[in-house]
Image (cartoon, rainbow, N blue to C red):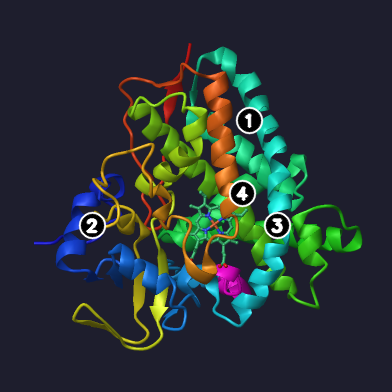
Amino acid sequence: MIADFDVSSDWHVAAPYGFLRGLRHEQPVFHSPHLGAYVLTRHEDVRAAYGDAKRFSSAGSLTISRSLTQATRDRLGEHGSFLSSFVANVDPPDHTRLRRSVSRAFTPRAVAAMEERFRRLNEDVLDRVEPDGRADFVPGLGHIPSTKLTARFIGVPESDEEFVKSHVKDWFMLFLSPQPADRQLELADSFLEYLAYVDRLVAARAAAPQDDFTSLMTSLIGSELTHREVVELISTILLGGNDTVPNQLGNSVYRLLRENIWPVPADLTQNAVEECMRIDGASLGSFRYAITDIDLHGVTIPAGALCLLSTDSAAHDETVFDDPETFRIDRPNADAHMTLGYGIHFCVGAALARLQLRTALDVLGERLPGLRLAPGQPIAYRKSIVGRGLPALLVEWD
Ligand code: HEM
């Protein structure tokens, strides 16, 4: 008998691959009572659904897993539907307009210009921790450069970085994972404080523009964007920088050290990044709503139903990736994963994410060629439906 998704259990977050394989073979359209969603697991189905925004809607898809109490909703007031106009959470034509605006900040030139800064941020962290000979990779090495790069990109002053970091974490927890009632209220307060902060930042840049993302987006208020859209964009991109890239880096370093591939040979770094994203993706999939009844593999997904497009399963689909549970640094089609999405919502920060992962692996390999896992540590992934990441990863070096 096929089990169900169970994000609260360790097997599910650590190694769901036998389960997902069973779904691909036996129930490629699986109705999960636990998720309250129809789950697509085959690579070709997941790809087709991402590519079919006319039948698979993103409207409201990011806010599905929240289970806010009435008291929390009252506390949040008009902000209870936060993210309702975030670019990943809307359909065309709003999506087309928002995407056009946000893309202006991610031109190839703008992204390439961040490489040197990011390299330096990694060097700075290493200058500090290298003499220690050991660290918890996640908070000690992995998070700091990405968080700082994103803060500079957005225009958050260095003195506010810690504030932003802790508040971003809080709102992520509030909206994207179920929390007990009293914890929800604490998180809601933290979130409201954070919104007020972003509002102040937008007002400051409207008065005195600088060379940063907030100034660029603020200059579009009134012509292309609303004030709320700008606040949601800034908040969410800060989250992107604080969470997704460091999670992917942690997963990647854990994988590479386990496979004894360290330091990563320079000519293979790019493919190593893709293979790490394939086998240990920091994003596990995206939610969509069926716009009409959708018939697939003998199942009718009813109009209005929630669907999970499991990129995690697609990345382990043996019809696309030979021997999918084996890490192959030179896998020719490693980049056929959809960990960065696919179609009109394809990650707008993809080039920046790849640049950071490549650069971090390069610098870490150069500076810590003897990096290894600390022996005997328990490894436990965070419990989440949409993201895989390690809260801690103890490493040592000579
Ligand atoms: C390894 C790191 C990252 C992963 C795994 C990741 C993953 C994803 C995925 C799966 C989507 C598609 C969501 C959907 O279709 O519903 C997406 C969209 C998006 N990502 Fe990323 N992302 C990463 C890094 C970043 C970074 C660094 C930024 C910005 C600095 C960013 C900004 C965005 C934005 C704004 C969207 C929405 C695009 C749209 O809806 O058109 N991401 N990302």
Q: Earlier in the sequence, mark 4 or mark 3?
A: 3
At label 2, the amino acid type is Leu
Q: Are marks 1 and 4 in contact (CB under 8 Å)?
A: no
Q: Are marks 3 and 1 in contact (CB under 8 Å)?
A: no
Magenta-drawn stretch contains 345:
no
Magenta-drawn stretch contains 77:
yes
Q: Residue at label 3?
A: 107
Question: Which residue sits at x=40%, y=55%?
Answer: 336
* In this picture, residue 150 sits left or right of residue 377: right
**Secondary structure type for disc 1:** helix
Give the distance between the C-alpha atoms of the residues marked 1 and 2, in whole angstroms. Answer: 36 Å
At label 3, the amino acid type is Thr
Q: Choose mark 3 or mark 1, whichever is in front.
A: 3
* Magenta segment boundaries in residue numbering: 76-88
Q: Earlier in the sequence, mark 1 or mark 4?
A: 1
Question: Which residue sits at x=34%, y=81%?
Answer: 305
Q: Choose mark 4 or mark 3, whichever is in front.
A: 3
* In this picture, residue 13 sits left or right of residue 129: left
Give the distance between the C-alpha atoms of the residues marked 3 and 1, in whole angstroms. Answer: 23 Å
Disc 4 crowd, CA 10 A, few/some/many (<14, 14-19, 20+): many
Q: Are marks 4 and 2 in contact (CB under 8 Å)?
A: no
At label 1, the amino acid type is Asn
- Foreground: 261 or 389? 261
The numbered dot on residue 288 is none
Q: Residue at label 4?
A: 352
- Foreground: 133 or 340? 340
**Which picture quadrant has residue 23?**
bottom left
Q: Choose mark 4 or mark 2, whichever is in front.
A: 4
Q: Residue at label 1?
A: 122
